[in-house]
Image (tube, rainbow, N blue to C red):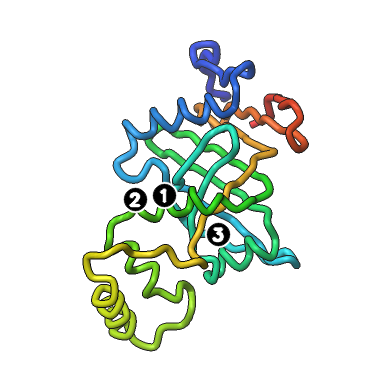
Amino acid sequence: MTESFNMSDLPLIDLTSDPFALFHTWMTEAEVTEPNDANAVAVATSTPDGRPSVRMLLLKGADERGFVIYTNTHSRKGEEILANPHVALLFHWKSLRRQIRIEGPVEPVTTEEADAYFASRSATSRLGAIASDQSRPLADRAIFEQRLKDAEAQYGSGPIPRPTHWTGFRVVPNHIEFWQDRPYRLHDRAVWSREGTSAWNVTRLYP
């Protein structure tokens, strides 16, 4: 026997919405309901020959220009972004039963943007960025902890400079999909897509 429910009782994703405005609406709601890090995002990169990798980061900026993340460019993700500047992002808010998928090319943030964000981090986080050879093999945790102490001794209470290999990237979206859970896996999905800076095309997708 097939279960039934009144689908008209559930609001649909508004296809007339601006995708950036809708993103901010969903993010604002997630900041209320998610117990930790509503801005946590899965970041997928790949090598030039198509070998993918994915990890969780924190989104650090979002506006009509795109979505900003920061990393050590000597890390695996940093090297993959530099070699193949195309990235996919995924937000999943379990408390709201929502997802947003974003795809697009990547461009570096400006030096001023990177400096400003780096300066906003805690002193320990800034020292950690200096001390860490991110993603490289570490023979003993004590080595890293000593390097952290050495960096602290070097910079003391003075300014802590941003390493040149630590910076941000902006994902310029050409594909943004909003996904809303519905009963019986009859989910509501809508995708905004565009080429370059052309106008968005929007359509609803089958569940």
Q: What is the spatial separation of the Cα atoms under label 3 and label 1, in whole angstroms?
A: 26 Å
Determine which quarter of the picture holds residue 157: bottom left
Q: Which residue is mark 1?
A: 116
The residue sitting at the front extreme is 158
Q: Of label 3 and label 1, which has the lower sequence position?
A: 3
Rendering quarter of residue 76: bottom right
Pointer 3: what residue?
54
Q: CA distance from mark 3 to mark 2?
A: 26 Å
**Amino acid found under the numbered disc labelled 1:** Ala
Depicted 27 relative to depicted 89: above or below: above
Q: Residues within 10 Å of mark 3 (few under 14, many from 20)?
A: some
Q: Quadrant of residue 33?
A: top left
Residue at 56% x, 29% y: name it.
20
Name the residue at 44% across, 54% down.
115
- Give the mark count: 3
Identified at 75% across, 67% down, the residue is: 49
Q: Which residue is mark 2?
A: 120
Q: Quadrant of the C terminus?
A: top right
Q: In x, y percent, where is residue 138? A: 41, 83
- In the image, 34: left or right of 70? left
Q: Residues within 10 Å of mark 2 (few under 14, many from 20)?
A: few
Q: Are marks 1 and 2 in contact (CB under 8 Å)?
A: yes
